Image: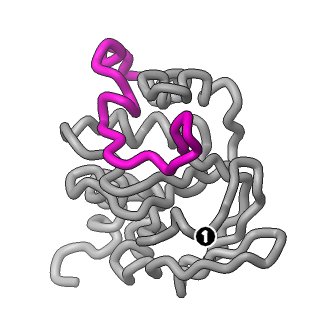
């Protein structure tokens, strides 16, 4: 599968890719009363310094690039669902927090690990295409970076629409 979209590279005031973006920065606990996934997008990243207006600028099909340990912290599912609500097509990070990674895959939110992507030179506004079968990331200027391909299980869960749908498809004895 290929995913193409406009990129948001989550950088700090010095232009450095941000590491350790935790679930509270992605979806702050003050919004936990919101249970409608369709409304969660408006709060995406509004507790991340410099990115408080992300939800107002992001569009369906956009791609987010972050540093190491993206989604660390709590098991807050809303931190995945807020991106789904906005229609974000892919999250790319050097690494993901273990619980966040599992939550994203289980809920069919495409994520791609790309260690070292901070050195690729991608900038917010670039259009990139990602081949999830082999992990290759290419922008419109043909700057290429090799991420990690989706695992077979990740692809199968994504294709099924989530872990529960995947389990139903597999059925007993499969």
Q: Residue at 25% x, 35% y: name it.
A: 76
* Front residue of this view, candidates 74 and 12: 12
Q: Residue at 73% x, 76% y: name it.
A: 143
Vertical side of 67 occupied by 166: above or below: below
Q: Is residue 15 magenta?
A: yes
Local SS, label 1: loop
- Sort mark 1 into few (<14), some (14-19) or many (20+) by Cα contacts within 10 Å: few
Q: Quadrant of the N terminus?
A: bottom right
* Front residue of this view, candidates 122 and 151: 122
* Front residue of this view, candidates 127 and 116: 116
Prevailing SS of the magenta stretch? loop
Q: Quadrant of residue 80?
A: top left
Is residue 31 toward the left or the right of residue 144 in the image?
left
The residue that label 1 is drawn on is: 120
Measured from the top left, where is residue 24 in percent x and y? Answer: 30, 29
For this orientation, the residue located farthest to the bottom is: 134
Q: Quadrant of residue 26?
A: top left
Vertical side of 10 occupied by 114: above or below: below
Q: Residue at 58% x, 44% y: name it.
A: 15
* Front residue of this view, candidates 41 and 139: 139
Q: Quadrant of the C terminus?
A: bottom left
Q: Quadrant of residue 109?
A: bottom left
Measured from the top left, where is residue 71 in percent x and y? Answer: 32, 46
Measured from the top left, where is residue 12 in percent x and y? Answer: 51, 38
Q: Is residue 141 magenta?
A: no
**Coloring scheme of the render?**
one colour
For this orientation, the residue located farthest to the front is: 14
Is residue 127 toward the left or the right of residue 41 in the image?
right
Give the tally of numbered discs.
1
For this orientation, the residue located farthest to the right is: 141
Measured from the top left, where is residue 44 in percent x and y? Answer: 49, 29
What's the magenta region? 10-35
């Amino acid at each position: 599968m290929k995913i193409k979209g406009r990129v948001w590279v989550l950088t700090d005031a010095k232009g450095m890719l941000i590491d350790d973006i935790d679930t509270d920065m992605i979806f702050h606990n003050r919004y936990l009363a919101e249970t409608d996934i369709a409304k969660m997008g408006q709060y995406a990243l509004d507790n991340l310094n410099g990115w408080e207006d992300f939800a107002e600028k992001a569009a369906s099909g956009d791609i987010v690039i972050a540093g190491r340990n993206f989604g660390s912290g709590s098991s807050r599912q809303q931190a995945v669902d807020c991106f789904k609500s906005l229609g974000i097509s892919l999250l790319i990070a050097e690494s993901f927090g273990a619980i966040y990674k599992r939550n994203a895959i289980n809920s069919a939110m495409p994520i791609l690990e790309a260690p070292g992507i901070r050195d690729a030179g991608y900038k917010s506004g670039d259009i990139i295409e990602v081949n999830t079968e082999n992990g290759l990331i290419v922008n419109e200027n043909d700057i290429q970076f090799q991420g990690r391909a989706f695992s077979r299980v990740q692809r199968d869960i994504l294709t099924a629409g989530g872990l529960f749908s995947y389990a139903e498809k597999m059925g007993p004895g499969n």
